[in-house]
Amino acid sequence: MCGICGKENKNFLCYECREKLQKEFEFKKIKSKNNFFIEQYYFFKYKNFARKLILELKFEKKPYIYKTIEYFLEKNQKKLEKIKKYDIIIVVPLSRKRKLKRGYNQSQLIAQCISNILQIEIQNGILYKTKDILPQSTLNKEERIQNIKGVYSAKNIDNIKNKKILLVDDIYTTGSTLNECCKVFAKSGIKKEDLGILTFAKD
């Protein structure tokens, strides 16, 4: 079934919707300043078809949509080569409570698409969310920064030292969540130059 229009399709994305999504595809790289990571990448602006895909994946219990995303990214594999310089992928985690409620971590599914296509290992068991908080989407920029402080912790840091790390999340809005994750790594001795972030969409 096509993840956008719902038509039956073995690739989870029909030709018509693939063409529409292709017009929205940007895959941009931005150098980062005043953050704990050196650069960020994103595939889409958070609007139109890309927004529909991520919202349904995230809130409407449609995990199969990751197959739509994977098929589309496979067709654009050559454009993704610039992130092959990263050694490992780490996923922004959900709290245990939220993951149990949703049944999956949508960012993990997106990361799995990238891992499958580029053969970059996903390293689990490193980054943890230690408590449940108010949804970031309900808060303004300053509230997001305060809400996310001290929420993440890292373990098994020796497993990722001296490796280039790509941190993956679903949406980049203010960057407070991703920056807080990278701050945890920085405190654990990971260099900023070894940290990049990738999101499916950027608001």
Image (cartoon, rainbow, N blue to C red):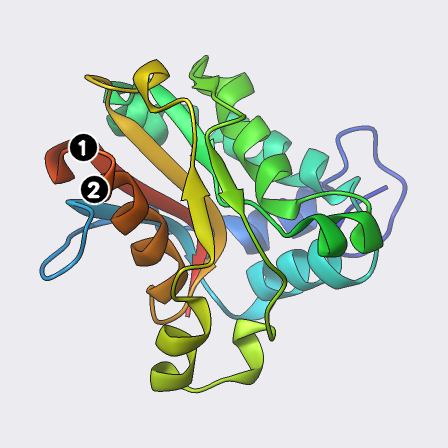
Q: Residue at x 35, y 66 (%)?
A: 176
- Binning the other alpha carbons within 10 Å of mark 2 as few (below 14), some (14 to 19) or many (20 upward) gives some
Classify residue 50 as left or right of residue 127. right
Q: Nearer the viewer, residue 96 or 112?
A: 96
SS type, badge 2: helix
Label 1, on which residue? 189
Disc number at residue 169? Answer: none
Q: Is residue 118 above or below residue 24?
A: above
Q: Is residue 134 above or below residue 78?
A: below
Expressed as whole percent of the image width and height from the top left, the position of residue 47 reads 52, 70
Q: Quadrant of residue 35?
A: bottom left
- Binning the other alpha carbons within 10 Å of mark 1 as few (below 14), some (14 to 19) or many (20 upward) gives few
Q: Residue at x 31, y 17 (%)?
A: 158
Please, what is the three-letter code of the amino acid marked with disc 1? Gly
Label 2, on which residue? 186
Classify residue 159 as left or right of residue 151. left
Please, what is the three-letter code of the amino acid marked with disc 2? Ala
Q: Quadrant of residue 175?
A: bottom left
Viewer can see residue 28: no
Q: Is residue 71 above or below residue 159?
A: below
Classify residue 66 as left or right of residue 108. right
Q: Nearer the viewer, residue 120 or 43?
A: 120
Q: Nearer the viewer, residue 143 or 41?
A: 143
Q: Count the labels in the image.
A: 2
For marks 1 and 2, give the CA distance: 5 Å
Specify the quadrant that holds the N terminus: top right
Classify residue 102 as left or right of residue 67. right
Answer whether labels 1 and 2 touch (C-beta < 8 Å). yes
Q: Quadrant of residue 179?
A: bottom left
Q: Residue furthest right?
A: 8
SS type, badge 1: loop
Viewer can see residue 182: yes
